[in-house]
Amino acid sequence: MSLTVIKSGFQDMIQDLGRIGYSHLGISEAGAADSISLRIGNILLGNNIKEAGIELTLFGGSYLFNKEAIILLSGSIFPSFIDNNPIDFFQPIHIDKGQILTIGSTNDGARCYLAIKGGFDVPSLLGSKATHLMSKAGGHYGRNIKKGDKIKYFGLDNINLPNNIKFNIDIDRSVLHVTKGLQFDLFDDINKELFFNNEFTVSHNSNRMGLRITGPKISTKISKDILTEGLPLGAIQITGSSDSIISFVDHQTTGGYPKIANVIAADLHKVGQLKPGDKFIFKLMSLDQAEKLYFQQESSLKK
């Protein structure tokens, strides 16, 4: 059982929740840029939340199903159709053998997710099916899905679906909450005010490794880089040229730029929905506040 890619999107790839626990070996987690949306898709289909889906960025393509399936689209809304009939997001949809799913361009955020009842049948690498483009590993041959590819999926063992599930997830991308970075004290009050009191814009020179953002030039009290150290997901680095970069899912695992702040875990899904030209501000909060938001989010997903 498989779907055939008639036309691929801008960047279609297999992703799950990532390859956890290998950063000390220089292997970043990868995984869905908006893991919350992928998890919601799997929950609504009755799948394991760790099941892989197809991540689509900015616009999708057309996909022929060679066997019946139950699918669900989640994330930002990309107008989508089965044989020219519009379909809703966040709703399980039955698709028959020979029908074509067409996914258009985003109406808002950067990414949407195609989940399928039972999951996609692709090999696991180090406990994950996630694609890591830079290392050409995982997913579908370690690369983006392209025209002519056949992506296998598991059959319908059962068609039981959960009922009446509601989620309370903050999707406002105009504010990214952060905690103090490892080198927060290397920045004086003037530069901290510049960072927290001004708007930033996502650069076109952004990808899954990191989002380059334009805004005020931030500088440290020191004139050189720090010693190379571990680089956490969501760290906001300030480069030697005073540019800002948010490390993201395919990030390198070490770095030598000072880190002024770190996007909180509960807001990382928002970073995955930021696209070039989007504007936002950073808002500082305590570790206790960040932890509280994380547990509130997890509680909503487990209802």
Image (cartoon, rainbow, N blue to C red):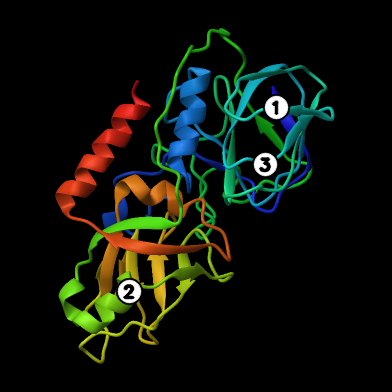
Residue displayed at 50% across by 69% down: 201
x%, y% of residue 40?
Answer: 47, 30
Q: State the CA–CA distance, disc 1 to disc 2.
A: 48 Å
Query: Considering the image in quadrants, where does the C terminus appear?
Result: top left
Q: Are marks 1 and 2 in contact (CB under 8 Å)?
A: no
In the rendered image, the vertical position of residue 158 relative to residue 184, given as above or below: above
Query: Of callouts 2 and 3, which one flags the residue occurring earlier in the amino acid sequence?
Result: 3
x%, y% of residue 67?
Answer: 74, 18
Residue type indicated by callout 3 = Phe
Mark 1 or 3, which is nearer the eye?
Answer: 3
Provide the residue designation for mark 1.
2
Provide the residue designation for mark 3.
78
Residue 252 seen in render: no
Does 61 sit left or right of 119 as displayed? right
Residue type indicated by callout 1 = Ser
User: In the depicted view, which residue is nearer to us: 249 or 82?
Assistant: 82
Callout 2: helix, strand or loop? helix
Residue displayed at 40% across by 36% down: 169
Mark number, residue 195: 2
Callout 3: helix, strand or loop? loop
Q: State the CA–CA distance, disc 2 to disc 3.
A: 33 Å
In the rendered image, the vertical position of residue 158 relative to residue 290, given as above or below: above
x%, y% of residue 153?
Answer: 62, 25
Rate crowding at label 1 as few (under 14), some (14 to 19) or many (20 or more) other CA atoms within 10 Å: many
Q: State the CA–CA distance, disc 1 to disc 3.
A: 22 Å
Mark 2 or 3, which is nearer the eye?
Answer: 2
